[in-house]
Amino acid sequence: MKVGYLGPKATFSELPVKMVFSEFEHIPYRTIAECMDAVVDQETELAVVPLENTLEGSVNITLDYLTQVVEIPIIGEITIPVKQHLMVHPANADKWKEVSKIYSHSHALAQCYQFLHKQFKGVPLESVSSTAAAAQMVMNSPEINAAAIANEYAAKVYGLALVQPNIHDFDYNHTRFVVLSQKEIDFQSLSSSNHYKTTLMVTLPSDQAGALHQVLSAFAWRKLNLSKIESRPMKTGIGNYFFIIDVEMQLDDVLIPGAIAEMEALGCGVKVLGSYPVLMVESD
């Protein structure tokens, strides 16, 4: 089987792929959208894409593309720790404090804001498609004396000198990835996880006071624990939103279907995006 991820090689997106899908063929794609398109077009059986980071919040392109462009069930979730490191070309290792530019993904730059503000104030920061792409650019351009922010695996793959480890601003930095597939693949046996989650997309009826309160009550009186509720614009006008809701249990025959039926009776639109095992990796 083939599994797609945000490339190039050695991105943070490849790390959960290596952990769980070691026997699959790994296919890097240039963008998150292309990863999902590959599943729709049957180029790959699965895609692993980032959904949320503890410091920077949701990855909007993933949420919007998954809810408004493609229809691919979520079959699993993998959460891994994220450690950001500063790296340069080996030829510039002795003069890394004088770098003229720093490349990385926008989320990685934001996760290291305090370090960059203190150590490299005034140095231009350039956002690129991934942390691994940043590492690749630095390795290919030794004459620029630029730095990249990426993971340790990227430093090894692209032969860069890691000059400042762990430059992220907060120690508890994790990224949540979702596994997408249109095929029935037993993620539970691959991950050995016994914890489940169900994700719903809920659209409220227009101009109905207290609708969100009624939606939350449908979960509350059934004692269904919600780990996340997030609003996203429907892109149909100012003030028009839908909600992504994570329920901390597997889809059953009574409680969650009952909550869905109650929400639909209120005039809400409800869609199950997936009910899936959750794997939490505590260390790398």
Image: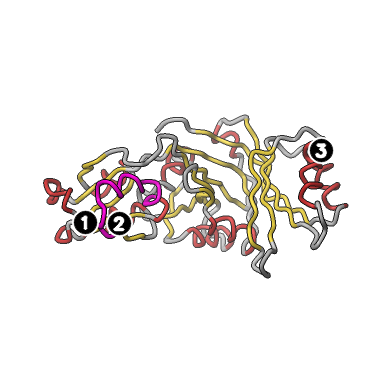
Q: In front: mark 1 or mark 3? A: 1
Question: Where does the magenta region start and end?
Answer: 108-124
Amino acid type, mark 3: Asp
> Where residue 212 sits: x, y (%)?
76, 50
Q: Which residue is mark 1?
A: 146
Amino acid type, mark 1: Ala
Taking 206 as reference, is 99 above or below it? above
Q: Give left or right: position of 216 versus 71.
A: right
> Where residue 196 sits: x, y (%)?
65, 35
Say which element carries label 1.
strand
| Rendered residue at 52%/40% (across/down) | 78
Say which element carries label 3.
loop
> Where residue 279 sits: x, y (%)?
55, 35
Taking 96 as reference, is 143 above or below it? below
Of all residues, the one furthest to the bottom in this rendering is: 237
- Residue 124, by quadrant, is bottom left
- Earlier along the polypeptide chain: callout 1 or callout 2? 2
| Rendered residue at 62%/37% (across/down) | 277
Amino acid type, mark 2: Tyr
- Chief secondary structure of the magenta portion: helix
Q: CA distance from mark 1 to mark 3?
A: 56 Å
Label placed on residue 253 = 3
| Rendered residue at 46%/39% (across/down) | 174
Label placed on residue 103 = 2
Q: Give left or right: position of 53 versus 271.
A: left
Callouts 1 and 2 close, C-beta under 8 Å: yes
- Earlier along the polypeptide chain: callout 1 or callout 3? 1
